[in-house]
Image (spheres, helix red, strand yellow):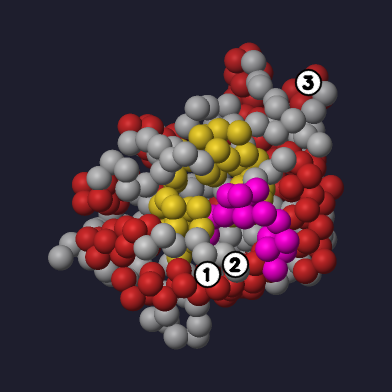
């Protein structure tokens, strides 16, 4: 078992493992139930207690899978997080953060997850088609009704976060879920300091840059057949972090990892978790050994000179895309 570490999630009383397990593009249909179960059990064995999903992953399939598997564990043994926003049917209107959609989807998520509450309910994206006051009030109602303990957001702009806090107060959110890794550091500029000022922790996704930071992609070579970038379902995902320059830069990290006696993935995860603003880094896994390998990063603490060496090795690596938080319109619809 890995020597798992835990951190307090924002201003909440939740203690979450610094490595968490996510279900995007895996347990939503790309990975069978037996594999899902094996990875989930590996997470428990590794000391992971935070499980992050969303209603839109497989349009409920990911929640259903974990509903079956997690029901075999004591409810107090894990922290359960899900999200709301994405389109849940062929109806384009079946999405967003309207009060009606939030009220419908929290009940549907709880039913699929087989629980009476989630520990963290997150706004998966910002909805500029709904007055923000209505969204905040609806999310607060989810907490007041006991269906969620705490609230978070994912990929909101700083202006959107400030506006929501102005309405709901400093204790509205306890978590932010941005993309963040050695190759994608945009949240450092504003989201991290803003969140720290308001008692909000980061639970980051794609800390391994869709696998780019594992070293499996090599300069001038085709994507490995079983890699995420090679899968049709990932078309477009590589536009966020992939570039030939990034592939070459990652190879410059190899001797740093070797000197430490760790894998590239462990180095990348430890780098991501180096700051106090980070509560947890979400990993994806299709095999239990991947869970254990990534969980091994939990106890690592990188000396300042190693962090500096990593930054120097990467340099000013260009990426070819942007996350929604960076591209999103700052427009905020008010009543």
What residue is pinned by disc 2?
A: 113
User: In whole angstroms, how far apart are the C-alphas of marks 1 and 2?
Assistant: 6 Å
| Image: 259 above or below 50 | above
Tell me the mark number nearer the camera, choosing from 3 and 1: 1
Quick one: label 3 or label 1, which is nearer the N terminus? Answer: 1
- Marking on residue 109: 1
Q: Which residue is mark 3?
A: 260
Disc 2 to disc 3, C-alpha distance = 40 Å
Q: Could you tell me how many numbered marks the image carries?
A: 3
Residue 181: image quadrant is top right
On the image, the x and y values in percent for residue 83 come to: 49, 61
Mark 1 and mark 2 in contact? Answer it, CB < 8 Å. yes
- Depicted 335 relative to depicted 7: above or below: below
Q: Which residues are magenta?
A: 68-82
* Quarter holding residue 245: top right
In the rendered view, would you say 141 is above or below 176?
A: below
């Amino acid at each position: 078992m890995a020597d798992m570490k835990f951190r307090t999630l924002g201003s909440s009383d939740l203690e979450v493992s610094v490595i968490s397990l996510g279900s995007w593009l895996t347990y939503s249909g790309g990975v069978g139930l037996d594999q899902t179960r094996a990875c989930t059990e590996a997470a428990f064995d590794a000391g992971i207690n935070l499980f992050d999903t969303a209603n839109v992953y497989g349009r409920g399939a990911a929640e259903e899978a974990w509903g079956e598997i997690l029901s075999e564990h004591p409810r107090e043994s894990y922290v359960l997080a899900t999200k709301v926003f994405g389109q849940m049917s062929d109806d384009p209107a079946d999405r967003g953060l309207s009060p009606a959609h939030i009220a419908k989807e929290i009940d549907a998520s709880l039913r699929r997850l087989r629980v009476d509450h989630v520990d963290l309910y997150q706004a998966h994206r910002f909805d500029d088609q709904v007055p923000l006051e209505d969204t905040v009030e609806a999310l607060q109602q989810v907490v007041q009704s006991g269906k969620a303990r705490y609230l978070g957001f994912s990929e909101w702009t700083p202006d959107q976060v400030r506006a929501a806090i102005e309405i709901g107060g400093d204790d509205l959110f306890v978590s932010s879920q941005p993309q963040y890794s050695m190759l994608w550091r945009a949240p450092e500029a504003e989201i991290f300091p803003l969140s720290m000022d308001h008692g909000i922790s980061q639970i980051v996704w794609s800390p391994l840059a869709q696998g780019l930071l594992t070293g499996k992609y090599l300069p001038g070579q085709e994507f490995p057949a079983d890699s995420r970038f090679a899968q049709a379902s990932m078309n477009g995902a590589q536009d966020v972090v992939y570039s030939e320059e990034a592939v070459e830069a990652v190879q410059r990290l190899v001797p740093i990892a070797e000197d430490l006696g760790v894998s590239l993935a462990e180095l990348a995860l430890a780098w991501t978790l180096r700051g106090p603003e980070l509560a947890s880094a979400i990993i994806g896994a299709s095999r239990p050994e991947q869970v254990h390998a990534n969980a091994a990063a939990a106890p690592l603490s990188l000396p300042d000179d190693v962090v500096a060496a990593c930054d120097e090795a990467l340099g000013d690596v260009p990426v070819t895309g942007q996350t929604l938080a960076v591209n999103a319109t700052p427009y905020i619809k008010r009543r």
